Amino acid sequence: MNRTRRVFRGAPSGRRVFRIIPGLHWLEAGSLFLLGCSAILLVGCKQEPRADLVIVNGNEPESLDPAIVTAVPDMRIAKALFEGLARLDARTDRPAPGLAERWEISPDGTTYTFYLRSNLVWSTGEPISTADVLYSWRRALSPSTASDYAGQLFYIKNAEAYYNGQLTDPSRVGIQALDSRRFQVQLDYPLAFFLDLCCYPTLAIVPRHAIEKYGDGWVTRTPLPCSGPYELVAWRLNDKVRVRKNPRYWDAARTRTELIDLLPTASPNTALNLYKTGIADVIWDKDLVPVELMDLLIKSPDFHNFSFLGTFFYRFNVTRKPLDDARVRRALALATDKEQIVRKLTFGGEKIATHYVPDGVANYQSPKAAGFDPEAARRLLAEAGFPGGRGFPALQYTFFASAGGGAKIQGKIAVELQQMWKKELGVEIGLRQIERKIFYSAQSRLDYDISASSWVGDYNDANTFLDMYVSTSGNNRTGWKNSRYDQLILEANRQADLLRRAELFRQAESLLVNEDIPIVPVYFYAGFALFNDKRVKGIFPSILDEHPLQEIWKPDRQSRVHVRQADLATRF
Protein backbone atom coordinates (compact mmCIF):
# COMPACT_ATOMS: atom_id res chain seq x y z
CA MET A 1 0.00 0.00 0.00
CA ASN A 2 2.84 2.51 -2.09
CA ARG A 3 1.30 10.69 -4.97
CA THR A 4 -0.43 22.05 -12.98
CA ARG A 5 0.18 21.05 -16.23
CA ARG A 6 -1.07 23.43 -18.85
CA VAL A 7 -4.29 24.44 -20.48
CA PHE A 8 -4.60 25.56 -24.08
CA ARG A 9 -7.74 27.28 -25.25
CA GLY A 10 -8.57 28.41 -28.75
CA ALA A 11 -8.42 32.27 -28.92
CA PRO A 12 -10.38 34.32 -31.47
CA SER A 13 -7.18 34.96 -33.43
CA GLY A 14 -6.48 31.24 -33.61
CA ARG A 15 -3.51 31.57 -31.21
CA ARG A 16 -3.05 29.20 -28.29
CA VAL A 17 -3.46 30.83 -24.91
CA PHE A 18 -1.31 29.48 -22.07
CA ARG A 19 -2.82 29.72 -18.59
CA ILE A 20 -1.38 28.39 -15.30
CA ILE A 21 -3.56 27.50 -12.37
CA PRO A 22 -2.83 30.00 -9.53
CA GLY A 23 -0.16 28.93 -7.06
CA LEU A 24 1.91 27.02 -9.59
CA HIS A 25 5.66 27.34 -9.10
CA TRP A 26 7.52 28.89 -12.03
CA LEU A 27 9.67 25.78 -12.48
CA GLU A 28 6.54 23.66 -12.72
CA ALA A 29 5.15 26.16 -15.20
CA GLY A 30 8.17 25.65 -17.43
CA SER A 31 7.76 21.89 -17.44
CA LEU A 32 4.05 22.33 -18.15
CA PHE A 33 4.85 24.50 -21.14
CA LEU A 34 7.01 21.74 -22.58
CA LEU A 35 4.26 19.22 -21.93
CA GLY A 36 1.78 21.56 -23.54
CA CYS A 37 3.92 21.76 -26.66
CA SER A 38 4.02 17.97 -26.73
CA ALA A 39 0.28 17.86 -26.40
CA ILE A 40 -0.15 20.14 -29.43
CA LEU A 41 2.12 17.91 -31.45
CA LEU A 42 0.19 14.85 -30.38
CA VAL A 43 -3.12 16.41 -31.36
CA GLY A 44 -1.84 16.89 -34.88
CA CYS A 45 0.21 13.74 -35.06
CA LYS A 46 -1.37 10.96 -37.10
CA GLN A 47 1.10 8.39 -35.81
CA GLU A 48 -0.08 8.79 -32.21
CA PRO A 49 -3.77 9.46 -31.61
CA ARG A 50 -5.01 10.91 -28.35
CA ALA A 51 -5.80 8.35 -25.69
CA ASP A 52 -9.41 7.52 -24.89
CA LEU A 53 -8.65 7.69 -21.17
CA VAL A 54 -5.88 9.51 -19.30
CA ILE A 55 -4.97 8.67 -15.71
CA VAL A 56 -2.57 10.50 -13.40
CA ASN A 57 -0.79 7.50 -11.93
CA GLY A 58 1.82 8.85 -9.50
CA ASN A 59 5.56 8.34 -9.63
CA GLU A 60 7.50 7.06 -12.63
CA PRO A 61 7.38 3.23 -12.57
CA GLU A 62 10.56 1.51 -11.46
CA SER A 63 9.57 -1.62 -13.37
CA LEU A 64 6.65 -3.28 -15.13
CA ASP A 65 7.88 -6.79 -14.28
CA PRO A 66 5.06 -8.26 -12.16
CA ALA A 67 7.48 -10.46 -10.21
CA ILE A 68 9.38 -7.51 -8.78
CA VAL A 69 7.00 -4.52 -8.70
CA THR A 70 6.22 -3.23 -5.22
CA ALA A 71 4.84 0.30 -5.67
CA VAL A 72 1.13 0.83 -6.32
CA PRO A 73 1.59 2.85 -9.57
CA ASP A 74 3.80 0.07 -11.00
CA MET A 75 1.34 -2.63 -9.97
CA ARG A 76 -1.60 -0.91 -11.66
CA ILE A 77 0.17 -1.10 -15.00
CA ALA A 78 1.61 -4.58 -14.46
CA LYS A 79 -1.87 -5.95 -13.67
CA ALA A 80 -3.19 -4.51 -16.92
CA LEU A 81 -0.41 -6.16 -18.94
CA PHE A 82 -0.10 -9.53 -17.19
CA GLU A 83 -2.85 -11.69 -15.73
CA GLY A 84 -2.74 -14.63 -13.36
CA LEU A 85 -4.84 -17.75 -13.05
CA ALA A 86 -7.38 -15.61 -11.21
CA ARG A 87 -8.17 -11.90 -11.17
CA LEU A 88 -10.02 -9.63 -8.74
CA ASP A 89 -13.62 -8.73 -9.45
CA ALA A 90 -13.86 -4.93 -9.63
CA ARG A 91 -17.14 -4.80 -7.71
CA THR A 92 -16.56 -7.40 -4.99
CA ASP A 93 -12.76 -7.50 -4.55
CA ARG A 94 -13.09 -11.28 -4.60
CA PRO A 95 -11.13 -13.71 -6.82
CA ALA A 96 -12.73 -14.50 -10.17
CA PRO A 97 -11.52 -16.75 -13.02
CA GLY A 98 -8.67 -15.22 -15.02
CA LEU A 99 -6.46 -17.23 -17.35
CA ALA A 100 -7.93 -20.28 -15.62
CA GLU A 101 -11.58 -20.77 -16.50
CA ARG A 102 -12.19 -22.83 -13.35
CA TRP A 103 -10.48 -24.74 -10.55
CA GLU A 104 -11.08 -27.69 -8.28
CA ILE A 105 -10.07 -27.90 -4.61
CA SER A 106 -9.41 -31.22 -2.90
CA PRO A 107 -11.59 -32.15 0.12
CA ASP A 108 -8.71 -31.42 2.52
CA GLY A 109 -8.16 -27.98 0.95
CA THR A 110 -4.50 -28.54 0.08
CA THR A 111 -4.61 -29.35 -3.64
CA TYR A 112 -5.81 -26.93 -6.32
CA THR A 113 -6.22 -28.01 -9.93
CA PHE A 114 -6.58 -25.12 -12.38
CA TYR A 115 -8.00 -25.53 -15.87
CA LEU A 116 -6.65 -23.02 -18.39
CA ARG A 117 -8.92 -21.55 -21.03
CA SER A 118 -8.62 -23.06 -24.48
CA ASN A 119 -8.23 -19.70 -26.26
CA LEU A 120 -5.21 -18.30 -24.43
CA VAL A 121 -2.48 -16.62 -26.49
CA TRP A 122 0.08 -13.93 -25.87
CA SER A 123 -0.63 -10.52 -27.35
CA THR A 124 2.02 -11.42 -29.96
CA GLY A 125 0.10 -14.55 -31.00
CA GLU A 126 1.98 -17.47 -29.37
CA PRO A 127 -0.12 -19.90 -27.30
CA ILE A 128 -0.12 -19.72 -23.50
CA SER A 129 0.06 -23.08 -21.74
CA THR A 130 0.64 -24.46 -18.27
CA ALA A 131 4.36 -24.55 -19.09
CA ASP A 132 4.23 -20.74 -18.99
CA VAL A 133 2.48 -20.84 -15.61
CA LEU A 134 5.10 -23.22 -14.24
CA TYR A 135 7.93 -21.04 -15.52
CA SER A 136 6.38 -17.84 -14.14
CA TRP A 137 5.85 -19.20 -10.63
CA ARG A 138 9.31 -20.78 -10.48
CA ARG A 139 10.81 -17.51 -11.65
CA ALA A 140 8.99 -15.54 -8.95
CA LEU A 141 10.25 -18.04 -6.38
CA SER A 142 13.85 -17.96 -7.57
CA PRO A 143 16.22 -15.91 -5.34
CA SER A 144 17.88 -14.56 -8.50
CA THR A 145 14.65 -12.75 -9.37
CA ALA A 146 14.84 -10.89 -6.03
CA SER A 147 11.08 -10.62 -5.60
CA ASP A 148 10.03 -8.94 -2.35
CA TYR A 149 6.83 -10.96 -2.59
CA ALA A 150 8.38 -14.38 -3.12
CA GLY A 151 6.98 -15.28 0.30
CA GLN A 152 3.50 -15.40 -1.22
CA LEU A 153 4.57 -18.74 -2.71
CA PHE A 154 5.92 -20.17 0.55
CA TYR A 155 2.56 -21.77 1.35
CA ILE A 156 3.26 -24.21 -1.49
CA LYS A 157 4.88 -27.53 -0.61
CA ASN A 158 8.72 -27.21 -0.49
CA ALA A 159 8.62 -23.66 -1.90
CA GLU A 160 10.33 -21.99 1.03
CA ALA A 161 12.99 -24.71 1.21
CA TYR A 162 13.71 -24.22 -2.50
CA TYR A 163 13.92 -20.45 -2.07
CA ASN A 164 16.35 -20.83 0.82
CA GLY A 165 18.55 -23.27 -1.09
CA GLN A 166 17.70 -26.28 1.07
CA LEU A 167 16.32 -27.91 -2.07
CA THR A 168 17.88 -27.45 -5.48
CA ASP A 169 15.46 -29.47 -7.59
CA PRO A 170 12.54 -27.23 -8.64
CA SER A 171 10.44 -30.29 -9.56
CA ARG A 172 10.10 -31.01 -5.84
CA VAL A 173 8.17 -27.78 -5.33
CA GLY A 174 4.44 -28.47 -5.23
CA ILE A 175 3.55 -27.03 -8.62
CA GLN A 176 3.29 -29.01 -11.83
CA ALA A 177 1.83 -28.88 -15.30
CA LEU A 178 -0.30 -32.02 -15.59
CA ASP A 179 -0.78 -31.34 -19.28
CA SER A 180 -1.04 -28.25 -21.49
CA ARG A 181 -4.22 -27.05 -19.79
CA ARG A 182 -4.18 -28.48 -16.25
CA PHE A 183 -1.97 -26.93 -13.59
CA GLN A 184 -1.83 -28.38 -10.09
CA VAL A 185 -0.70 -26.79 -6.82
CA GLN A 186 -0.06 -28.61 -3.55
CA LEU A 187 -0.12 -26.51 -0.38
CA ASP A 188 1.41 -27.39 2.96
CA TYR A 189 -1.97 -26.79 4.61
CA PRO A 190 -5.39 -25.31 3.72
CA LEU A 191 -5.12 -21.58 3.09
CA ALA A 192 -8.14 -19.29 3.24
CA PHE A 193 -6.66 -16.67 0.89
CA PHE A 194 -4.76 -18.76 -1.66
CA LEU A 195 -7.02 -17.73 -4.55
CA ASP A 196 -6.47 -14.10 -3.56
CA LEU A 197 -2.74 -14.68 -3.99
CA CYS A 198 -3.39 -16.04 -7.47
CA CYS A 199 -4.74 -12.58 -8.38
CA TYR A 200 -1.57 -10.81 -7.28
CA PRO A 201 1.08 -9.61 -9.79
CA THR A 202 3.76 -11.88 -8.31
CA LEU A 203 1.85 -14.91 -9.60
CA ALA A 204 0.98 -13.40 -12.99
CA ILE A 205 1.98 -15.25 -16.14
CA VAL A 206 4.99 -13.80 -17.96
CA PRO A 207 6.59 -14.68 -21.34
CA ARG A 208 9.52 -17.05 -20.97
CA HIS A 209 10.57 -16.65 -24.59
CA ALA A 210 10.96 -12.86 -24.19
CA ILE A 211 12.70 -13.03 -20.82
CA GLU A 212 15.22 -15.62 -21.97
CA LYS A 213 15.91 -13.62 -25.13
CA TYR A 214 16.28 -10.14 -23.60
CA GLY A 215 17.14 -10.75 -19.93
CA ASP A 216 16.35 -8.07 -17.36
CA GLY A 217 15.41 -5.59 -20.09
CA TRP A 218 12.57 -7.70 -21.44
CA VAL A 219 9.80 -5.34 -20.29
CA THR A 220 11.25 -2.49 -22.35
CA ARG A 221 11.31 -4.43 -25.64
CA THR A 222 8.48 -4.17 -28.13
CA PRO A 223 6.40 -5.91 -29.09
CA LEU A 224 6.07 -7.09 -25.49
CA PRO A 225 4.14 -10.37 -25.17
CA CYS A 226 1.33 -9.67 -22.69
CA SER A 227 -1.16 -12.05 -21.06
CA GLY A 228 -3.51 -9.37 -19.72
CA PRO A 229 -6.24 -7.15 -21.14
CA TYR A 230 -3.76 -4.53 -22.40
CA GLU A 231 -0.51 -4.53 -24.33
CA LEU A 232 2.29 -2.01 -24.03
CA VAL A 233 2.50 0.65 -26.74
CA ALA A 234 5.20 2.82 -25.18
CA TRP A 235 6.95 3.53 -21.90
CA ARG A 236 8.56 6.95 -22.14
CA LEU A 237 10.40 8.00 -19.02
CA ASN A 238 8.95 11.11 -17.39
CA ASP A 239 6.29 11.28 -20.09
CA LYS A 240 3.80 8.42 -19.97
CA VAL A 241 3.04 4.76 -20.23
CA ARG A 242 0.62 4.08 -23.07
CA VAL A 243 -1.31 0.81 -23.25
CA ARG A 244 -3.70 -0.47 -25.89
CA LYS A 245 -6.47 -3.04 -25.70
CA ASN A 246 -5.06 -6.52 -26.31
CA PRO A 247 -7.28 -7.95 -29.09
CA ARG A 248 -6.02 -11.48 -28.33
CA TYR A 249 -6.93 -11.36 -24.65
CA TRP A 250 -9.46 -14.06 -23.74
CA ASP A 251 -11.98 -11.44 -22.51
CA ALA A 252 -11.20 -8.71 -25.04
CA ALA A 253 -14.88 -8.30 -25.92
CA ARG A 254 -15.48 -6.85 -22.45
CA THR A 255 -12.40 -4.62 -22.28
CA ARG A 256 -14.09 -1.24 -22.31
CA THR A 257 -11.41 1.25 -23.43
CA GLU A 258 -9.11 1.00 -26.43
CA LEU A 259 -6.20 3.34 -25.57
CA ILE A 260 -5.09 4.52 -22.12
CA ASP A 261 -2.30 6.86 -21.06
CA LEU A 262 -0.91 6.70 -17.53
CA LEU A 263 1.00 9.84 -16.66
CA PRO A 264 3.83 9.86 -14.11
CA THR A 265 4.01 12.91 -11.90
CA ALA A 266 4.83 13.52 -8.26
CA SER A 267 3.63 17.14 -8.36
CA PRO A 268 0.12 17.69 -6.96
CA ASN A 269 -0.15 21.10 -8.67
CA THR A 270 0.67 19.48 -11.99
CA ALA A 271 -1.76 16.63 -11.38
CA LEU A 272 -4.64 18.91 -10.42
CA ASN A 273 -4.04 21.22 -13.38
CA LEU A 274 -4.06 18.22 -15.71
CA TYR A 275 -7.41 17.22 -14.27
CA LYS A 276 -9.03 20.65 -14.09
CA THR A 277 -8.14 21.41 -17.70
CA GLY A 278 -9.60 18.14 -18.98
CA ILE A 279 -6.30 16.67 -20.06
CA ALA A 280 -6.54 13.91 -17.45
CA ASP A 281 -9.71 12.04 -16.55
CA VAL A 282 -8.72 10.46 -13.24
CA ILE A 283 -6.39 11.16 -10.33
CA TRP A 284 -5.94 8.04 -8.23
CA ASP A 285 -4.15 9.09 -5.10
CA LYS A 286 -4.54 11.65 -2.35
CA ASP A 287 -0.79 12.30 -2.55
CA LEU A 288 -1.46 13.85 -5.96
CA VAL A 289 -3.67 16.74 -4.88
CA PRO A 290 -2.52 19.83 -2.96
CA VAL A 291 -3.20 19.17 0.71
CA GLU A 292 -4.04 22.84 1.24
CA LEU A 293 -7.00 22.42 -1.14
CA MET A 294 -8.30 19.21 0.40
CA ASP A 295 -11.04 20.98 2.39
CA LEU A 296 -12.39 22.36 -0.92
CA LEU A 297 -11.89 19.21 -2.98
CA ILE A 298 -13.73 17.08 -0.45
CA LYS A 299 -16.88 19.12 -1.18
CA SER A 300 -16.58 18.63 -4.93
CA PRO A 301 -18.86 16.10 -6.69
CA ASP A 302 -15.70 14.76 -8.34
CA PHE A 303 -14.21 13.76 -4.96
CA HIS A 304 -14.77 10.08 -4.18
CA ASN A 305 -13.89 8.75 -0.74
CA PHE A 306 -14.19 5.16 0.48
CA SER A 307 -12.91 2.84 3.16
CA PHE A 308 -9.88 0.80 2.22
CA LEU A 309 -7.21 -1.29 3.86
CA GLY A 310 -4.20 0.96 4.34
CA THR A 311 -2.11 2.03 7.34
CA PHE A 312 0.50 4.75 7.80
CA PHE A 313 3.08 3.84 10.43
CA TYR A 314 6.74 4.25 11.27
CA ARG A 315 9.17 1.40 11.73
CA PHE A 316 12.31 0.95 13.78
CA ASN A 317 15.61 -0.54 12.69
CA VAL A 318 15.95 -2.82 15.73
CA THR A 319 19.51 -3.76 14.78
CA ARG A 320 20.74 -0.30 15.84
CA LYS A 321 21.26 0.85 19.41
CA PRO A 322 19.37 1.98 21.39
CA LEU A 323 16.45 0.89 19.20
CA ASP A 324 17.35 -2.73 19.94
CA ASP A 325 15.78 -2.08 23.38
CA ALA A 326 12.00 -2.57 23.33
CA ARG A 327 11.66 -0.05 26.17
CA VAL A 328 13.09 2.69 23.96
CA ARG A 329 10.78 1.76 21.10
CA ARG A 330 7.79 1.70 23.43
CA ALA A 331 8.74 5.07 24.91
CA LEU A 332 8.82 6.68 21.44
CA ALA A 333 5.47 5.04 20.64
CA LEU A 334 3.81 6.30 23.83
CA ALA A 335 5.15 9.80 23.19
CA THR A 336 3.42 9.92 19.79
CA ASP A 337 0.17 11.89 19.83
CA LYS A 338 -1.59 10.32 16.85
CA GLU A 339 -4.75 12.35 17.33
CA GLN A 340 -2.79 15.59 17.00
CA ILE A 341 -1.16 14.37 13.79
CA VAL A 342 -4.48 13.50 12.18
CA ARG A 343 -6.20 16.67 13.43
CA LYS A 344 -3.45 18.99 12.20
CA LEU A 345 -2.15 17.31 9.08
CA THR A 346 -4.62 15.01 7.32
CA PHE A 347 -7.90 16.18 5.85
CA GLY A 348 -9.21 13.29 3.78
CA GLY A 349 -11.17 11.24 6.30
CA GLU A 350 -8.21 9.42 7.92
CA LYS A 351 -8.65 7.89 11.38
CA ILE A 352 -6.06 7.39 14.09
CA ALA A 353 -4.64 3.88 14.18
CA THR A 354 -5.21 2.29 17.59
CA HIS A 355 -3.88 -0.95 16.09
CA TYR A 356 -2.07 -2.03 12.92
CA VAL A 357 -4.52 -4.10 10.86
CA PRO A 358 -7.22 -1.69 9.59
CA ASP A 359 -10.86 -2.01 10.57
CA GLY A 360 -12.99 -3.86 8.05
CA VAL A 361 -10.72 -6.86 7.46
CA ALA A 362 -12.80 -10.03 7.08
CA ASN A 363 -13.21 -12.28 10.15
CA TYR A 364 -10.88 -10.25 12.36
CA GLN A 365 -10.79 -7.59 15.06
CA SER A 366 -7.47 -6.17 16.23
CA PRO A 367 -6.21 -5.81 19.80
CA LYS A 368 -5.94 -2.20 20.94
CA ALA A 369 -2.50 -0.67 21.36
CA ALA A 370 -1.58 1.65 24.21
CA GLY A 371 -2.39 5.29 23.44
CA PHE A 372 -0.63 8.58 24.04
CA ASP A 373 0.95 8.39 27.52
CA PRO A 374 3.99 10.69 27.85
CA GLU A 375 4.44 10.00 31.57
CA ALA A 376 4.78 6.26 30.97
CA ALA A 377 7.05 7.03 28.01
CA ARG A 378 9.43 9.07 30.19
CA ARG A 379 9.50 6.31 32.79
CA LEU A 380 10.40 3.69 30.20
CA LEU A 381 13.12 5.84 28.69
CA ALA A 382 14.64 6.36 32.14
CA GLU A 383 14.57 2.59 32.77
CA ALA A 384 16.46 2.14 29.50
CA GLY A 385 19.20 4.46 30.80
CA PHE A 386 18.20 7.82 29.30
CA PRO A 387 16.43 9.84 32.02
CA GLY A 388 15.07 13.05 30.56
CA GLY A 389 16.71 12.09 27.28
CA ARG A 390 20.22 12.53 28.69
CA GLY A 391 22.82 10.47 26.88
CA PHE A 392 20.40 9.54 24.10
CA PRO A 393 22.41 9.11 20.87
CA ALA A 394 21.80 11.06 17.68
CA LEU A 395 19.17 9.28 15.57
CA GLN A 396 17.38 10.18 12.36
CA TYR A 397 13.81 9.85 11.14
CA THR A 398 13.87 9.05 7.41
CA PHE A 399 11.10 9.93 4.95
CA PHE A 400 10.88 10.34 1.19
CA ALA A 401 11.02 13.62 -0.68
CA SER A 402 7.89 14.86 -2.41
CA ALA A 403 6.78 17.70 -4.61
CA GLY A 404 3.91 18.59 -2.32
CA GLY A 405 0.26 17.63 -1.90
CA GLY A 406 -0.72 14.63 0.16
CA ALA A 407 2.84 13.32 -0.06
CA LYS A 408 4.02 16.58 1.50
CA ILE A 409 2.41 15.32 4.71
CA GLN A 410 5.41 13.01 5.06
CA GLY A 411 7.65 15.95 5.88
CA LYS A 412 5.07 17.55 8.14
CA ILE A 413 4.62 14.33 10.09
CA ALA A 414 8.39 14.09 10.44
CA VAL A 415 8.56 17.59 11.96
CA GLU A 416 5.60 16.84 14.23
CA LEU A 417 7.19 13.65 15.55
CA GLN A 418 10.52 15.40 16.03
CA GLN A 419 8.84 18.09 18.16
CA MET A 420 6.78 15.58 20.15
CA TRP A 421 9.79 13.47 21.04
CA LYS A 422 11.77 16.57 22.02
CA LYS A 423 8.96 17.94 24.18
CA GLU A 424 7.90 14.72 25.90
CA LEU A 425 11.18 12.80 26.10
CA GLY A 426 13.92 15.38 25.72
CA VAL A 427 15.51 13.49 22.81
CA GLU A 428 16.86 15.05 19.63
CA ILE A 429 15.85 13.21 16.45
CA GLY A 430 17.25 14.50 13.18
CA LEU A 431 15.29 14.44 9.92
CA ARG A 432 16.56 12.75 6.77
CA GLN A 433 14.66 13.32 3.52
CA ILE A 434 15.69 11.24 0.50
CA GLU A 435 14.37 10.60 -2.99
CA ARG A 436 11.58 8.03 -3.06
CA LYS A 437 13.36 5.26 -5.01
CA ILE A 438 16.44 5.55 -2.82
CA PHE A 439 14.18 5.63 0.22
CA TYR A 440 12.72 2.16 -0.42
CA SER A 441 16.15 0.75 -1.20
CA ALA A 442 17.47 2.20 2.06
CA GLN A 443 14.63 0.55 3.97
CA SER A 444 15.43 -2.83 2.45
CA ARG A 445 19.12 -2.43 3.37
CA LEU A 446 18.21 -1.31 6.91
CA ASP A 447 19.97 1.96 6.16
CA TYR A 448 17.87 4.02 8.58
CA ASP A 449 17.07 4.46 12.28
CA ILE A 450 13.35 5.27 12.23
CA SER A 451 11.47 5.34 8.94
CA ALA A 452 8.11 6.52 7.64
CA SER A 453 6.17 3.58 6.20
CA SER A 454 2.82 2.55 4.82
CA TRP A 455 1.10 -0.65 3.84
CA VAL A 456 -1.97 -1.33 1.71
CA GLY A 457 -3.59 -4.75 1.93
CA ASP A 458 -2.97 -7.10 -0.98
CA TYR A 459 -6.13 -9.08 -0.15
CA ASN A 460 -8.91 -8.93 2.41
CA ASP A 461 -7.37 -10.95 5.22
CA ALA A 462 -5.38 -10.03 8.34
CA ASN A 463 -2.49 -12.11 7.04
CA THR A 464 -1.65 -9.55 4.36
CA PHE A 465 -0.64 -7.12 7.13
CA LEU A 466 0.78 -9.56 9.66
CA ASP A 467 2.85 -12.01 7.63
CA MET A 468 5.18 -9.23 6.44
CA TYR A 469 6.88 -9.30 9.86
CA VAL A 470 7.78 -12.97 9.93
CA SER A 471 11.54 -13.43 10.02
CA THR A 472 11.84 -14.53 6.38
CA SER A 473 9.68 -11.83 4.79
CA GLY A 474 11.33 -9.48 2.30
CA ASN A 475 8.86 -6.80 3.42
CA ASN A 476 9.87 -6.95 7.09
CA ARG A 477 12.57 -4.27 6.73
CA THR A 478 13.05 -3.81 10.48
CA GLY A 479 15.64 -6.44 11.38
CA TRP A 480 13.11 -7.73 13.93
CA LYS A 481 12.90 -11.50 14.34
CA ASN A 482 10.65 -13.22 16.84
CA SER A 483 10.21 -17.00 16.78
CA ARG A 484 6.98 -16.78 18.78
CA TYR A 485 5.55 -14.35 16.25
CA ASP A 486 6.58 -16.63 13.37
CA GLN A 487 4.90 -19.59 15.05
CA LEU A 488 1.67 -17.68 15.74
CA ILE A 489 1.35 -16.65 12.09
CA LEU A 490 2.09 -20.20 10.94
CA GLU A 491 -0.48 -21.71 13.30
CA ALA A 492 -3.08 -19.09 12.40
CA ASN A 493 -2.81 -19.84 8.71
CA ARG A 494 -3.15 -23.56 9.33
CA GLN A 495 -6.38 -23.07 11.27
CA ALA A 496 -9.69 -23.99 9.68
CA ASP A 497 -11.56 -22.55 12.71
CA LEU A 498 -11.95 -18.83 11.90
CA LEU A 499 -12.39 -17.84 15.55
CA ARG A 500 -9.24 -19.64 16.64
CA ARG A 501 -7.38 -18.23 13.64
CA ALA A 502 -8.40 -14.69 14.58
CA GLU A 503 -7.26 -15.20 18.17
CA LEU A 504 -3.82 -16.35 17.05
CA PHE A 505 -3.53 -13.33 14.78
CA ARG A 506 -4.52 -11.07 17.68
CA GLN A 507 -1.72 -12.50 19.80
CA ALA A 508 0.72 -11.86 16.96
CA GLU A 509 -0.49 -8.30 16.41
CA SER A 510 -0.20 -7.61 20.13
CA LEU A 511 3.50 -8.50 19.89
CA LEU A 512 3.83 -5.90 17.14
CA VAL A 513 2.01 -3.00 18.77
CA ASN A 514 2.15 -3.68 22.55
CA GLU A 515 5.19 -5.78 23.40
CA ASP A 516 8.18 -5.79 21.03
CA ILE A 517 6.95 -2.81 18.97
CA PRO A 518 9.10 -2.92 15.81
CA ILE A 519 6.44 -0.65 14.26
CA VAL A 520 4.11 2.10 15.46
CA PRO A 521 0.81 2.55 13.55
CA VAL A 522 -0.23 6.22 13.29
CA TYR A 523 -3.38 6.46 11.16
CA PHE A 524 -5.55 4.54 8.71
CA TYR A 525 -5.82 5.80 5.16
CA ALA A 526 -9.07 6.73 3.47
CA GLY A 527 -9.55 5.71 -0.15
CA PHE A 528 -9.49 8.54 -2.68
CA ALA A 529 -10.13 9.15 -6.36
CA LEU A 530 -10.89 12.29 -8.32
CA PHE A 531 -13.07 11.83 -11.39
CA ASN A 532 -16.35 13.02 -12.89
CA ASP A 533 -18.69 10.05 -12.56
CA LYS A 534 -20.84 11.38 -15.41
CA ARG A 535 -17.89 11.16 -17.81
CA VAL A 536 -16.00 8.19 -16.40
CA LYS A 537 -17.63 4.87 -15.53
CA GLY A 538 -16.41 1.58 -14.08
CA ILE A 539 -14.60 2.86 -10.97
CA PHE A 540 -16.13 1.32 -7.86
CA PRO A 541 -15.47 1.77 -4.13
CA SER A 542 -12.92 -0.88 -3.23
CA ILE A 543 -11.63 -1.92 0.17
CA LEU A 544 -8.43 -2.97 -1.61
CA ASP A 545 -8.28 0.21 -3.73
CA GLU A 546 -8.38 -2.03 -6.82
CA HIS A 547 -9.66 -0.48 -10.04
CA PRO A 548 -8.94 -2.76 -13.05
CA LEU A 549 -8.27 -0.70 -16.17
CA GLN A 550 -10.35 -2.97 -18.38
CA GLU A 551 -13.47 -1.99 -16.41
CA ILE A 552 -13.07 1.77 -16.86
CA TRP A 553 -14.69 3.57 -19.75
CA LYS A 554 -16.08 6.92 -20.92
CA PRO A 555 -19.59 7.13 -22.35
CA ASP A 556 -18.46 10.09 -24.44
CA ARG A 557 -14.94 9.50 -25.82
CA GLN A 558 -14.68 12.88 -27.53
CA SER A 559 -11.37 14.68 -27.12
CA ARG A 560 -10.89 16.56 -23.88
CA VAL A 561 -9.92 19.58 -25.99
CA HIS A 562 -13.65 20.15 -26.61
CA VAL A 563 -14.59 20.18 -22.93
CA ARG A 564 -15.61 23.69 -21.96
CA GLN A 565 -13.20 25.31 -19.51
CA ALA A 566 -16.07 27.14 -17.87
CA ASP A 567 -17.76 23.84 -17.01
CA LEU A 568 -14.57 22.48 -15.46
CA ALA A 569 -13.95 25.63 -13.44
CA THR A 570 -17.37 25.45 -11.77
CA ARG A 571 -16.61 22.03 -10.30
CA PHE A 572 -14.12 23.48 -7.79
Image (cartoon, rainbow, N blue to C red):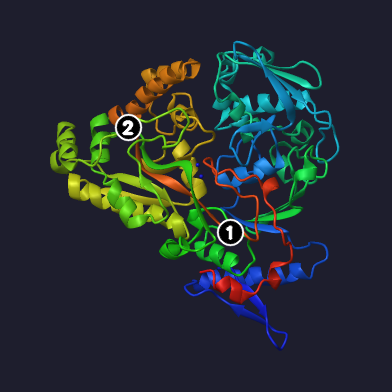
**Alpha-carbon distance for marks 2 and 1?**
37 Å
Residue 426 seen from this side: no
Crowd tier of the residue under label 2, counting other residues whose Cα lies within 10 Å: few below 14, some 14–19, many 20 or above: many
* Whether residue 22 is situated above or below residue 265 in the rendered picture: below
Q: Quadrant of residue 131?
A: top right
* Whether residue 401 is situated above or below residue 23 in the rendered picture: above
Question: What residue sits 59% from the left and 38% below the top?
Answer: 92
Q: Quadrant of residue 254?
A: top right
Q: Is residue 115 left or right of residue 70?
A: right
* Residue type at tag 2: Val
* Residue type at tag 1: Phe
Q: Is residue 410 left or right of residue 225?
A: left
Crowd tier of the residue under label 1, counting other residues whose Cα lies within 10 Å: few below 14, some 14–19, many 20 or above: many
Q: Which mark is residue 215?
A: none
Q: Please tell me whether mark 2 sits on a helix, a strand or a loop.
A: helix
Answer with mark 2 or mark 1, whichever residue precedes in sequence: 2
Q: Is residue 45 left or right of residue 65?
A: right
Residue at which label 2 appears:
513
92 or 323: which is nearer to us? 92
Residue at which label 1 appears:
531
Residue 174 seen from this side: yes
